[in-house]
Image: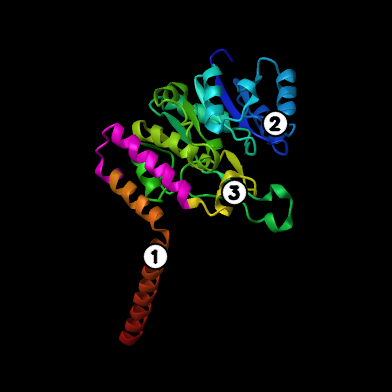
Amino acid sequence: MANQSLVSVIMPFFNAGNFIHEAIESVLAQTYDHWELLLVDDGAHDGSARIAINYAERYPGKVRYLHHEGFRNKGACASRNLGVRRADGVFIALLDADDVWFPRKLEEQVAILESHPEAAMVYGPSQYWYSWTGNPDDMQRDYVRPLGLAADTLCKPPTLLTLALESKAPTPCPSDIIVQRRVVDSVGGFEEQFRGIYQLYEDQAFLAKVCLEHPVFVSSECWDKYRQHPDSCVSVVTARGKKYTVGLFYLEWLERYLSERAINDDELWRALRSKQFRYRFPNFNRLLNSTRHRFLQTKEFIGQIGRRAVR
């Protein structure tokens, strides 16, 4: 144990009473034991704070309960930053209070980081988890989202950010990543302006800062279950029809961030401009995609006729 690196697990929560017990238990079940769990209360008022406090009392020295001054709600980014400030670990692992980890998650990720010390972060594909409901209609809906790039490789910056803007490689789920503590500090932690509905992009803003400057190891292993439910931030924003409004907020923030740092990567800037256009004019983009699809269908149909005529 003395030779193992300490992992600080940061779990912010707000009214997560239905799920937080399962999330915490998935940390306790880890095969890698040298971790600390920081449960950060973001102003919860549903009883989840009591659950967190009970775990902290049952596991002193392993589990800690934190809260903002006055028990205020300050958003996931501020809560994660609070957790990072109070963390003692060499590595930071994130876990949302409605997600769960597979038992070997920390063991395998720490092994990768220690064998690739140049890697700032490790992530793999997540399991999109519908079957947690027990509903027969949901039992077959679980799937692991493709990475969109070659796995088990070290990606140099800013490759992952460019691919994400091009919609070729999805941004990893926060509950899947583990990152070097020194890197979290070097990029300034999480952007606290991403609150409310804009919280949908709080993880993307943080990951953009990491992937812009540091190499990241992308693994083929699936280490987490990403719970799909109607009260999640993604579901709420989608239901309100705010997807493009929230997306533009992130893209405009990213443009300022790149400009302030005088980033001159042409491919990255082209990807950003293209993404901004698609989000500013979503109806035109849908029409363009529909027209392109019909053109390809027509081209294929004509090709089939030509091949039959040759026969």
Pointer 1: what residue?
Answer: 289
Give coordinates of residue 34: x percent, y percent. Answer: 60, 20
Left/right placement of residue 18 relative to residue 75 reads right
Residue 310, placed above or below residue 5: below
For marks 2 and 3, the one nearer the N-term is 2
Give the amino acid type for the residue marked by disc 3 in the picture: Val
The quarter holding residue 150 reads top left
**Which of the pair 20/155 is nearer the observer?**
20
Q: Please provide the residue range marked out in magenta.
A: 244-268
Quadrant of the snapshot with the N terminus: top right
* Mark drawn on residue 236: 3
Q: Are marks 3 and 1 in contact (CB under 8 Å)?
A: no
The quarter holding residue 7 reads top right
Give coordinates of residue 310: x percent, y percent. Answer: 30, 85
**Which of the pair 145/86 is nearer the observer?**
86
- For image coordinates 29% across by 48% down, the residue present is 270
- The Cα–Cα distance between marks 3 and 1, rounded to whole angstroms, is 26 Å
Pointer 2: what residue?
Answer: 25
Give coordinates of residue 95: x percent, y percent. Answer: 59, 33
| Residue count near mark 2 (Cα–Cα under 10 Å), binned few <14, some 14–19, many ≥20 | few
Asked if residue 156 shows in the view, the reply is no
- For image coordinates 70% across by 26% down, the residue present is 52
| Residue count near mark 1 (Cα–Cα under 10 Å), binned few <14, some 14–19, many ≥20 | few
Quadrant of the snapshot with the C terminus: bottom left
- For image coordinates 36% across by 71% down, the residue present is 296
For marks 2 and 1, the one nearer the N-term is 2
Q: Main secondary structure of the magenta part?
A: helix
